[in-house]
Image: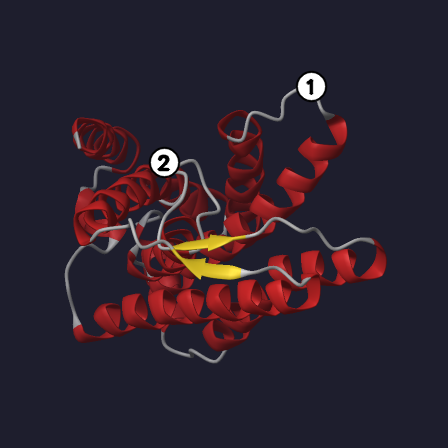
Amino acid sequence: MIGILVELLLSWLILWMFDKSNLSVLGFKITTNQSLNFIFGFLGASLFCVLYYFSYSVYAANSITVNKQFTFIQFLHSFWWVLSSVLFEELIFRGALLYILIKKFGIKYACIASAIAFGIYHWFSFGVIGNPASMLVVFIMTGIWGLMYAFAYAKTKSLYLPIGLHLGWNLIHIAVFSKGPLGHQFLIVSDKKLEGIESLIFFILQIIVLPVVTYLCLKKNKQNPDKLKQIQNSSIN
């Protein structure tokens, strides 16, 4: 929590120094649209994560058992850990810096820069530095999802959608299917791996399905691009 508060303070300072604005430009105000964006992102990412891991388990013949020792208190601890990590990353990569980059260079280049930074960051958080193959896989996977999160912020002018997407996937991934640093959580899944073309297909599905669906949904939104132009033009006046 202290780290997040520090991030908010630094974000405010960056916005004031380079844009003479404040944290309101990050879209923290709760509105009906932003609430729906968060719900859409959270439920969409959660559902995709469930379908992905159940499908993978079927094809890989992995067993799935409920961890009877997993308690509600443990879930709350796991939820708080996931939420804190998501907020920490979103404030860094989709916060003040992305807002300023969008105003200076436009959505396309700002989102690409954010995605590249997000991918490189995960080399360190995943501990794959020095392993070229793992570095490439991690960069592609997290970079594409980082691009999705950045585009979600750029099109909605708020962190609610990227936070919802990020939280939905990470919570199910870590606290339900035990695929993270917290050890055994709600479900215990055996670790048989797919190989060959099946492994490649599931890898591709994992990294592109949700980003493509999110992109298509956001492209249908005709209102937000006008808002973006107003924000970008305000920096010129």
Q: Are marks 2 and 1 in contact (CB under 8 Å)?
A: no
Q: Is residue 139 above or below residue 175?
A: above
Residue 57 x, y percent position in the rendering: 61, 63
Q: Is residue 210 visible?
A: no
Residue corresponding to mark 1: 130
Q: Is residue 124 left or right of residue 131?
A: left
Q: Is residue 147 above or below residue 77?
A: below
Write the residue at 31% across / 55% down: 68
Name the residue at the right extreme.
196
Name the residue at the front extreme.
68
Q: Is residue 147 visible?
A: yes
Among numbered discs 2 and 1, the one appearing first in the sequence: 2
Q: Where is residue 157, by image quadrant? A: bottom left
Q: Relative to the observer, which residue lies in front, 122 or 186?
A: 186
Q: Relative to the observer, which residue lies in front, 151 or 89?
A: 89
Residue 91 x, y percent position in the rendering: 31, 40
Q: Which element carries disc 1, helix, strand or loop?
A: loop
Q: Which element carries disc 2, helix, strand or loop?
A: helix
Residue 86 x, y percent position in the rendering: 34, 44
Q: Which mark is residue 92?
A: 2
User: Dividing the image into 4 quarters, which one contains the N terminus?
Assistant: top left
Given this view, does label 2 or label 1 mark the residue nearer the observer? 1
Q: Relative to the observer, which residue lies in front, 66 or 116?
A: 66
Q: How dense is the environment of label 2, judged by Cα within 10 Å: few (below 14), some, or many (20 and up)?
A: many
Write the residue at 50% across / 51% down: 106
Q: Relative to the observer, which residue lies in front, 93 or 170?
A: 170
Q: How dense is the environment of label 1, judged by Cα within 10 Å: few (below 14), some, or many (20 and up)?
A: few
Write the residue at 39% across / 62% down: 229
Q: Is residue 229 left or right of residue 116?
A: left
Name the residue at the top extreme.
130
For badge 1, the amino acid type reads: Gly
Write the residue at 37% across / 60% down: 168
